[in-house]
Image: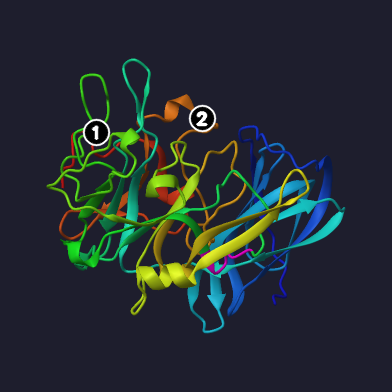
Amino acid sequence: MFLAIAGLTFTTVACSDDDNTNGVVDNTPAKVSLTFTGDNIAEIKSMKVDFKEINTGIVTTKDITASPSELDLKKGSYTATANGTVKLTTGEEIEAAGTVAFDLTQNAQNVTIKLSIKNFSEDFIIEEVFFTGVRTLENKIYTSGRYFKLTNNTNKVLNTGGLIVFKSEFLPSTNNTNTPEIRNTHFAVNGALMIPATLGKDVQPGDFVVIADMAMNHKTTNIPAYDLSNADYEFPNLDNPSLGQVDNPAVPNATVIYSSANYNMYFLHNRGLESYAIARFPANETTETWLANYKYDYEYPNQAGNITKKSAYKVPNSWILDGVNSAVDATWLRNPLDASIDSGFTGCGTIDSDPERYGKTIRRKVIGTMENGKPMYKDTNNSTEDFKKMSASSFANGIVH
């Protein structure tokens, strides 16, 4: 597609050791001819590509201004993630991203990254997710009091009715060869939490809503958790009495419309090894039609050499308003969300089961203020840049608008 070959700069950064090894380890330099493809893309304006070598955890960053471009990399097993600006055939300049996994085994090798145009919507964004739980003063794990904070980052009034919060079927710490591979068109999910249209409320520019597992004050003299009694919605699980969860009658309930877990439970991974997305069904689509038409049957070869078959559900990427990948550096292998929705990842902790993660959240960065004085949040569809890892909760003093 492209003819020019441009110069490039690079830096190398050492990351935490990775428990996953692919067996391709070689310090011999190799010549890589890197090419970008993508629908209606005419030219690469600028592109930053991070190459993570899976065996060592070393990340090499290349700044590229043309395709193809030639670069040197040590042989190994890589996941490459690209973020940058492209020029379309229409002349418009727009943000794009892409990712690819490959084994670099030859002295000279061609690598192609397919780029997708980043999808942005004039709707709610995910501002904060609290999934880690806290440790009590007796050093016990307290798993309740988790929440999503969704913010109106636009200059218009938005209604929450019909919003759906999806959880990923796949973990960023696994890299199975799933067939069919659907990430470029769909998001595979194992849970869906919906705010019914009848419970929708208007949200002013810059304001937010909180969806908590239980809308109560979780903070006690023994538990350093947060007061969520003023949450806008809650999703307690009352089907499993062993959980001991309670329903606050003063707070409307979001509905779990799908869960792969027993008792229809909707739980957040306490290490944050999953991805989240918010979406709306398009006109004429309902919960019933989604469940009838969007089942995702897939398979992959397991370590024993057999084929594992599973089922989940899928959400078209075109329905998604915003998404965030959550992972830890030491075990990250790939993103469950397509790069057009989130080309990076954030998280709590740098190692698996990091003891420092408790009580911390992932929060979106503030880049300015709106006309009404409310915060304006960064949104580039790259959560590595958009979010602050291991953040303090915004509700340390309760929910204050």
x%, y% of residue 399? Answer: 18, 42
Q: Nearest the camera: 109 or 200?
A: 200
Secondary structure state at the residue bearing disc 2: loop
**Circle 1 is placed at which residue position?**
226
| Tags 1 and 2 touching, CB below 8 Å | no
Residue at position x 24%, y 62% in the image: 160
x%, y% of residue 339? Answer: 54, 61
Q: Nearest the camera: 369 or 151?
A: 151
Q: Magenta-highlighted stretch: main secondary structure?
A: loop
- The earlier-in-sequence mark between 1 and 2 is 1
Q: How is the image coloured?
A: rainbow
Residue most toward the bottom?
90
**Circle 2 is placed at which residue position?**
353
Secondary structure state at the residue bearing disc 1: loop
The magenta segment: 181-186
**Side of 183 where 111 appears, left or right:** right
Say if 155 sits above or below 392 in the image: below
x%, y% of residue 151? Answer: 27, 55
Residue 265 shows up from this direction: no
**Side of 118 where 305 appears, left or right:** right
Mark 1 burial class by Cα count in 10 Å: few <14, some 14-19, many 20+: many
**Side of 314 where 225 appears, left or right:** left
Residue at position x 69%, y 38% in the image: 20
Compute the Cα span from label 1 to label 2.
22 Å
x%, y% of residue 215? Answer: 21, 42
Residue 19 shows up from this direction: yes
Residue most toward the top?
138
Say if 270 sits above or below 162 in the image: above
| Type of amino acid at the residue the image marks with label 1 | Tyr
